[in-house]
Amino acid sequence: MLGYALALTAAPEAMTAEHLKPMRAAGLSDAEILDANQVVAYFAYVNRLVDGLGVQLERSDAGA
């Protein structure tokens, strides 16, 4: 699933049905693959939205 997420993030225009085969071979259902696709696409959308608006995120001091 991580390989799929990386490929979808880095080169969405290059995605083919072949990218789904390893996930299906690992036992993921079409619904689970769709869920993974939607999570990756959502984060790509949100990141582009924030970047496009020039939003600066606040730094968290939780780990300091």
Image: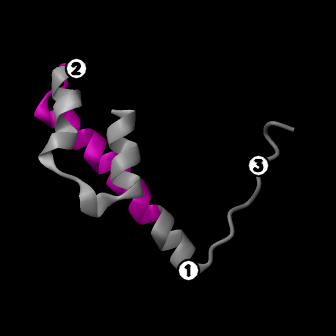
Label placed on residue 60: 3
Q: Give neighbour class at mark 3: few <14, some 14-19, many 20+ (Cα, 10 Å).
A: few
Q: Earlier in the sequence, mark 2 or mark 3?
A: 2
Picture layout, residue 19 above or below residue 26: below
In the image, what residue occupies the spot 76% across and 49% down? Answer: 60
- Kindly indicate whether the residue at mark 3 contacts the one at mark 2 (C-beta within 8 angstroms): no
Residue receiving disc 1: 53
Reading the image, the residue beneath label 2 is 26
Q: Amino acid at mark 3?
A: Ser
Q: Amino acid at mark 1?
A: Leu
Kindly identify the residue that appears in the image at 35 percent across and 48 percent down: 7
What secondary structure is the stretch in magenta mostly built from? Answer: helix
Q: Does residue 13 appear left or right of residue 43 in this picture?
A: left
Against 56, residue 5 (above or below) is above
Which of the image's four quarters has the N terminus? top left
| Local secondary structure at mark 3 | loop
The quadrant of the image that shows the C terminus is top right
- Residue 43 appears left or right of 19: right
Q: Is residue 60 magenta?
A: no
- Mark nearer the N terminus (1 vs 2): 2
Mark 3 vs mark 1, CA separation in Å: 21 Å
